[in-house]
Image (spheres, helix red, strand yellow):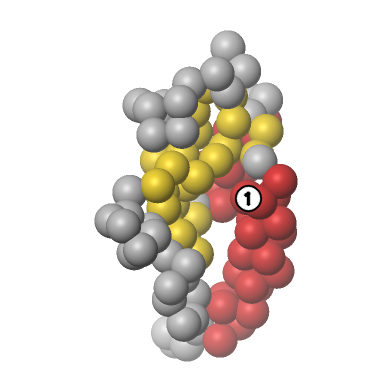
Amino acid sequence: MALKIRLTRIGALHQPHYRVVIAEARSRRDGAPVETIGSYDPRAKANGFKVNLERVDYWMSKGALPTDTLHAMIKRARRAAPAAEAAAPVAV
């Protein structure tokens, strides 16, 4: 069972919206996923990509491979994660 981390489309016509899912490599694009780990809204002005990086790491350790598009998006999200943590206020 080869797994892929990929996008599945859920948006209406001319209103794209995607879910980031773990799915079998041979299943169809909008088929039943193993797990949903995030979302992507390409029309959003800021931060349209949300993904659970812990689950990405877990599934990649189990052998799941991201598509080329998601590989680039995950790299960008990893770079943005430390900046977001640094900007968050710390309660004393």
Q: Where is residue 46 in the image (x, y as percent from the top left)?
A: 48, 81
Q: Position of residue 29 (x, y in %)?
A: 46, 33
Q: Nearer the viewer, residue 7 or 60?
A: 7
Residue that protrudes farthest toward the top in the picture: 1
Q: What element carries label 1?
A: helix
Above or below: residue 70 compared with residue 36: below
Q: Which of 63 and 2 is in front in this view?
A: 2
Q: What's the residue type where badge 1 is placed?
A: Leu
**Which corner quadrant of the image does residue 4 belong to?**
top right
Q: Can residue 7 be seen in this view?
A: yes
Above or below: residue 70 compared with residue 81: above
Q: Residue at x 39, y 60 (%)?
A: 16
Task: Point out the image quarter for the N terminus.
Answer: top right
Q: Residue at x 56, y 52 (%)?
A: 53
Label 1 Cα crowd, 10 Å radius (few <14 / some 14-19 / many 20+):
some
Q: Residue at x 35, y 26 (%)?
A: 32
Q: Residue at x 28, y 56 (%)?
A: 12
Q: Position of residue 82 (x, y in %)?
A: 65, 72
Instruction: Give the number of marks.
Output: 1
Above or below: residue 75 compared with residue 70: below
**Can you identify the residue that label 1 sits on?**
70
